[in-house]
Image (cartoon, grey):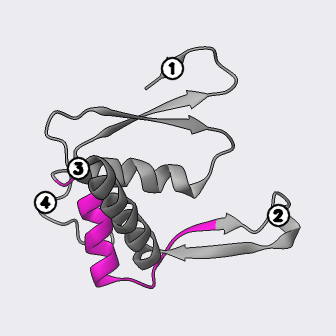
Amino acid sequence: MKAPPFAIPKDCGHRLLPVLVDELAANEPHKVFISVGRTGDAKDGFIDVTFGAFARAINRCAWWIEGTLGRDSSFQTLFTYLEPQDLRHAVLIFAAIKTGYKVKFWISQCSMLTD
């Protein structure tokens, strides 16, 4: 088997995603995480969101959750309404993990709650 063209970290597969995002934000803050459309039309262009900006958004959301609800050690559920896919949902999921919660989304097309 041919070796990959990059080094695989020793702790690969043993970190939570929020920890990985924090590490990438610390080591490569200007690296693009995702490009988000300016509007619903691709011809209007895209905005690049870096790992640094994504990590700051997660930390601000986690700060708000902790200040409003406190930290949780029993992994209680936060409910949210889900409409069109949006980067805020990823921010909320990562912030919930950091503060000890899980997220349950209400999807308007369905009549039930889904995990």
- Asked whether, in this view, residue 31 is left or right of residue 47, the answer is left
Which span is picked out in magenta? 15-35
Q: Residues within 10 Å of mark 2 (few under 14, many from 20)?
A: few
Q: Earlier in the sequence, mark 3 or mark 1?
A: 3
Q: Are marks 1 and 2 in contact (CB under 8 Å)?
A: no
- Rendered location of residue 28, percent (x, y): 35, 83
Q: Which residue is mark 4?
A: 11
Tell which tag, 2 or 4, sits nearer the viewer. Answer: 2
Tell which tag, 4 or 1, sits nearer the viewer. Answer: 1
Tell which tag, 3 or 1, sits nearer the viewer. Answer: 3
Q: Earlier in the sequence, mark 4 or mark 1?
A: 4
Disc number for residue 113? 1
What is the CA distance from the residue labelled 3 to the residue labelled 1? Answer: 24 Å
> Against 48, is 12 above or below?
above
Residue 54 among magenta residues:
no
Give the structural element (helix, strand or loop) at label 2: helix
What is the CA distance from the residue labelled 4 to the residue labelled 3? Answer: 30 Å
Q: Which residue is mark 3?
A: 70
Q: Which residue is mark 2?
A: 42
Tell which tag, 4 or 3, sits nearer the viewer. Answer: 3
**Residue 92 visible in the shown view:** yes
| Three-letter residue code for mark 1 | Leu
| Three-letter residue code for mark 3 | Gly
Q: Residues within 10 Å of mark 1 (few under 14, many from 20)?
A: few
